[in-house]
Amino acid sequence: MPEIDEQVKQGVAQALAELGVTKETMADLAKMKEVKRAEIGERTTNVEVGEDPKMKFKSLSETLRAVKTATTRGQVDPRLTYKAATGLGEGISADGGFLLQPQISSGLIQRVYEIGQITSRCQKITIGSGANTLKLNAVDETSRASTRMGGIVGYWLEEAGTITASKPKFRVMTLDLKKVGALFYATDELLQDLPAMEAVVSNGCAQELTFQVEGAIFSGNGVGKPLGIQAGNAHVTVAKETAPAQAAATILTENIFKMWSRMYAPCRANAAWYINQDCEPQLFSLYKVVGVGGVPVYMPANGLSEKPYGTLMGRPVIPIEYAETVGSEGDITLADFGQYILADKGDVQAASSIHVEFLTDQQCFRFIYRVDGQPIWSQPLTPHKGTNTVSPFVNLAVRA
């Protein structure tokens, strides 16, 4: 009916003309509609996780079960995409990887720092969004013999005397985030059991991430991982005894006293002894001769020290897996990890795949944590008086 359609169009045009609505007015209304639609869409996609409690997962296990359902059945829980990931879209990959929600991610990282004997003692800095590198100005002080803080000098002055200008010296510390990952497999039965799933993920993955990060902090070479205190140039090494010659794979009272004397005095209050567990039998036999008798140097845990750890020189003795075997340098270390900077991204990314163990009906979950670290000190410090350098990191030399 072309004639009728044309008549309708003419009638509508005449009605709009009588109302004073022109083509220009219609174009303006269309533009306003598009602007309004864009504003509504922008508010919808930028909703922050946590604004609506209904859009938050209750636990990590609940999150992973939702990921599994999304990857196997294609039923995506809206909580997985409540805030779309920037860049490539909502999912990390076609295999079903999704970003962890902030409260779950931070909970896993918090667990890493709670159970860690080293990470809990480091200076931690979180790098914000849009950056993967941290640059810090650190005092470049290698000697206090004539200046302090790398160049500051003070003077005693007579009345109206002139003071000579001086200034501190700084160096730039650069931390570029590295990646460490943990991987585990979960059967359908485990995914259906939320309490068991929570225990496996929270404990297993947190412990593995802790192991990897702390191992790097202690002895990492800085290549693709943090620079550890053993590989850096800031530590000092106390020589073994020579008169009489010290036996192989032994720890003597004299070693402990000399290591303590090389710890930078302001760091002693925060220092601790980190040992290979095989060192403990020798620590029990350490004593200081007094007259015809002696007093113990090592105070066992929950004994005279009344503390959860044994103590040497009043500081805790902490067995760690990363320490070297007895007789090697690094089997016993006196360290203040408050002099170590640890930077991270503040979150963990999780991804999953149904293909890795498809034949065994297992889901594969991967966690990625981005972190870097290095000692604040670049090398040992020469004191104002004395000949031996000092440091917040002290080793005992090889006893072979």
Image (cartoon, rainbow, N blue to C red):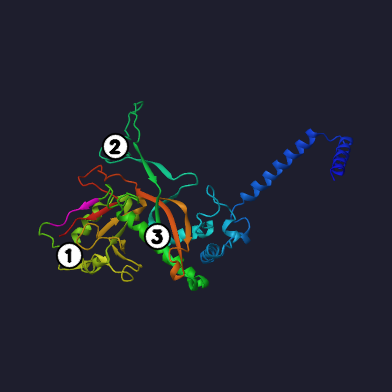
Residue holding disc 2: 147
Tell me, yes or no, whether the highlighted magenta stretch contains residue 240.
Answer: yes
Could one spot residue 341 in this view of the protein? no
Residue ID at (46%, 47%): 127
Tell me, yes or no, whether the highlighted magenta stretch contains residue 11.
Answer: no
Of labels 3 and 2, earlier in sequence is: 2
Viewer-side residue, 264 vs 279: 279
Q: Which mark is in front, 1 or 3?
A: 3
The total number of labels drawn is 3
Q: Which mark is residue 289?
A: 1
Quadrant of the image for the C terminus? bottom left
Residue ID at (34%, 71%): 302
Q: Residues within 10 Å of mark 1 (few under 14, many from 20)?
A: few
Of labels 1 and 2, earlier in sequence is: 2
Separation (CA) of disc 3 from disc 2: 42 Å
Viewer-side residue, 11 vs 209: 11
Q: Which mark is residue 343?
A: none
Separation (CA) of disc 1 from disc 2: 40 Å
Residue 327 locus on image (x, y percent): 19, 61
Residue 229 locus on image (x, y percent): 30, 52
Q: Amino acid at mark 2?
A: Thr
Side of 252 where 59 appears, left or right:
right
Q: Residues within 10 Å of mark 2 (few under 14, many from 20)?
A: some
Q: Residues within 10 Å of mark 3 (few under 14, many from 20)?
A: many
Side of 168 where 27 appears, left or right:
right
The vertical placement of 42 against 247, above or below, is: above
Side of 100 where 243 appears, left or right:
left
Viewer-side residue, 353 vs 199: 353
Q: Quadrant of residue 154?
A: top left
Tell me the magenta residue range: 236-241
The vertical placement of 397 against 305, above or below, is: above
